[in-house]
């Protein structure tokens, strides 16, 4: 970082610092100056451990700084240590650390606070994590989009070695975005800011959608996700989006810990007056020492598998909070060498009245009339289909009536599929699932940005109908 960095603004609850890889101070706000007695100009370029900590506390801080710079290092670290003010007086200090950038020229962010004056630790950590997460999300999204364009060949062919390295960077940026989203979700839950829109729904269709949504994630692990058992007409009062979040999280977790060529079994059962969903893997099971803290925040079993399969350790904590907000309960059973079953139970709602439910809405963005007519004929029993033959027309229809699914051609008279995907991503509400249905080769980066992709020339009626029903929250026809 060349030149003087922009001055950080002070916070009412503690000081905020920026640090280089070696622990040198790159920025120092007014609250840090008040706590330690050193002005910003005096603190810049000083080594943080030597400037603020007593001698005995310095090795621990140096070790934490090194770990945070590693690609598989923690996302947040906390340290308490005796510290020194400028005049030599000693006091108890609390430090929270997080990486803003890893790899070449890493940058760290530190939050410092007098321990005697701090609010409860959990609240302070949540505020800090939320601040850092918001700072990370925007640049990461931009980086991921740019790397996706390079991976897809939009800037021309690259040397094989460069292509491999960019593909690794793309996958890691995608992983970091998921980690940041997990952190923001846990902060919303605990601050009471996560909103829920409850309604009574049939559960089986949502299991079908969650399985379809995790197929691309399961493919590199060589794991098959299947419905083992499903009772008809089981209903519960839930938030649909949050239910899908729980299901996809549990299924993805089961995939991650399944052996290659293994299966993940999903079941929907009656349990007395309630309904129960089970997600079972056939992996190594959960270590006994870790079972009591499986739903805690930032919890990760210390095994070779979990070190290889990195994450925030927040997913199961998020699932527990969401299920409990829906008046349910969540738990697990596990056996060493036999696998693990996570299960959640929800109060069963009364059967739906015999009135016919409205059909889901599909927006088909396609400029070829013959393709439009064929798709509408295929789907007329399953969905209401509207179409647009231009990008701008599609945007207008999205504003008029949000669809439940978009079937998208890549080439349009006034733009392409990427333009519409960008518009959806920039919206204020979660976008509907998108299925590419187009002629010719589909760029790899576009396939990663949508829920499903199919070629007009190699997809038959049954395949298309199965895919659409799965994305419209219904199980594939083979599962019915």
Image: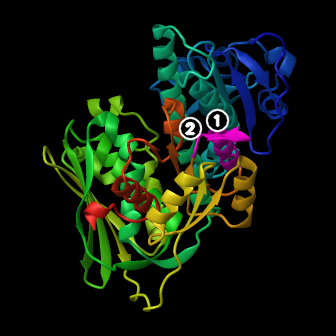
> What whole-number distance in Å separates the C-alpha atoms at marks 1 and 2?
7 Å
Q: Residue at x 49, y 38 (%)?
A: 447
Q: Which residues are magenta?
A: 409-426
What SS does tag 1 mark?
helix
* x and y, in percent, of residue 466 in the image: 37, 58
Viewer-closest of 319 and 198: 198
**Image quarter hosting the N terminus:** top right
- Farthest residue toward the front? 370
- Please name the residue that numbered disc 2 is placed on: 177
* x and y, in percent, of residue 197 in the image: 59, 72
Q: Residue at x 52, y 18 (%)?
A: 166
Viewer-closest of 201 and 364: 364
Viewer-closest of 306 and 8: 306
Q: Residue at x 37, y 82 (%)?
A: 348
- Side of 464 relative to 60 (left or right): left
* x and y, in percent, of residue 234 in the image: 34, 78
Residues at discs 1 and 2 in contact (Cβ within 8 Å) = yes
Viewer-closest of 480 and 365: 365
**Image quarter hosting the C terminus:** bottom left
- Farthest residue toward the left? 337
- Side of 224 relative to 321 (left or right): left
- Please name the residue that numbered disc 1 is placed on: 141
* x and y, in percent, of residue 459 in the image: 38, 47
Q: Is residue 339 visible?
A: yes
Is 419 within the magenta? yes
Residue 359 drawn above or below residue 458: below
Of labels 1 and 2, earlier in sequence is 1
What SS does tag 2 mark?
helix
């Amino acid at each position: 970082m060349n030149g003087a960095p922009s001055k950080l603004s002070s916070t009412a609850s503690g000081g905020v610092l920026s640090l280089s890889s070696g622990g040198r101070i790159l920025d120092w706000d007014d609250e840090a100056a008040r706590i330690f007695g050193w002005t910003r100009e005096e603190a810049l370029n000083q080594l943080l451990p030597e400037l603020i900590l007593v001698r005995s506390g310095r090795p621990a801080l140096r070790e934490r700084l090194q770990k945070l710079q590693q690609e598989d290092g923690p996302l947040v670290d906390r340290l308490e240590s005796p510290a020194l003010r400028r005049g030599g007086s000693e006091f108890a200090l609390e430090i929270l650390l997080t990486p803003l950038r890893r790899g070449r020229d890493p940058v760290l962010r530190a939050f410092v606070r007098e321990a005697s004056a701090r609010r409860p630790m959990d609240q302070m950590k949540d505020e800090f994590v939320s601040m850092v997460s918001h700072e990370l999300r925007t640049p990461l999204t931009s980086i991921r989009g740019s790397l996706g364009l390079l991976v897809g060949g939009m800037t021309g062919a690259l040397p094989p070695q460069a292509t491999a390295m960019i593909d690794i960077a793309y996958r890691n940026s995608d992983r970091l975005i998921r980690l940041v989203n997990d952190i923001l979700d846990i902060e919303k839950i605990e601050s009471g800011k996560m909103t829920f829109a409850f309604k009574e729904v049939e559960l089986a269709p949502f299991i079908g959608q969650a399985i379809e949504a995790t197929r691309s994630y399961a493919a590199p692990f060589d794991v098959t996700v299947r419905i083992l058992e499903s009772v008809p007409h089981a209903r519960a009062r839930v938030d649909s989006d949050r239910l899908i979040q729980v299901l996809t999280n549990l299924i993805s977790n089961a995939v991650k810990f399944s052996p290659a060529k293994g299966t993940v079994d999903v079941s929907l059962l009656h349990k007395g007056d309630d309904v129960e969903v089970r997600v079972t893997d056939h992996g190594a099971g959960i270590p006994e020492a870790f079972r009591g803290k499986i739903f805690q925040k930032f919890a990760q079993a210390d095994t070779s598998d979990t070190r290889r399969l990195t994450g925030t350790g927040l997913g199961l904590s998020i699932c527990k909070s969401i299920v409990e907000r829906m008046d349910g309960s969540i738990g697990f059973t596990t056996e060493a060498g036999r696998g693990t079953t996570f299960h959640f139970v929800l109060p069963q709602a009364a059967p739906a009245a015999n009135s016919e439910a409205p059909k889901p809405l599909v927006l088909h963005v396609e400029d070829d009339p013959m393709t439009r007519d064929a798709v509408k004929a295929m789907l007329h029993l399953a969905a209401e289909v509207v179409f647009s033959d231009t990008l701008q027309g599609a945007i207008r229809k999205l504003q008029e009536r949000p669809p439940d699914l978009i079937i998208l051609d890549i080439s349009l008279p006034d733009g392409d599929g990427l333009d519409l995907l960008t518009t959806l991503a920039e919206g204020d509400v979660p976008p509907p699932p998108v299925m590419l249905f187009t002629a010719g080769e589909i760029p790899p980066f576009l396939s990663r940005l949508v829920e499903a992709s199919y070629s007009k020339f190699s997809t038959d009626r049954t395949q298309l109908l199965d895919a659409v029903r799965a994305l419209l929250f219904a199980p594939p026809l083979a599962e019915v």
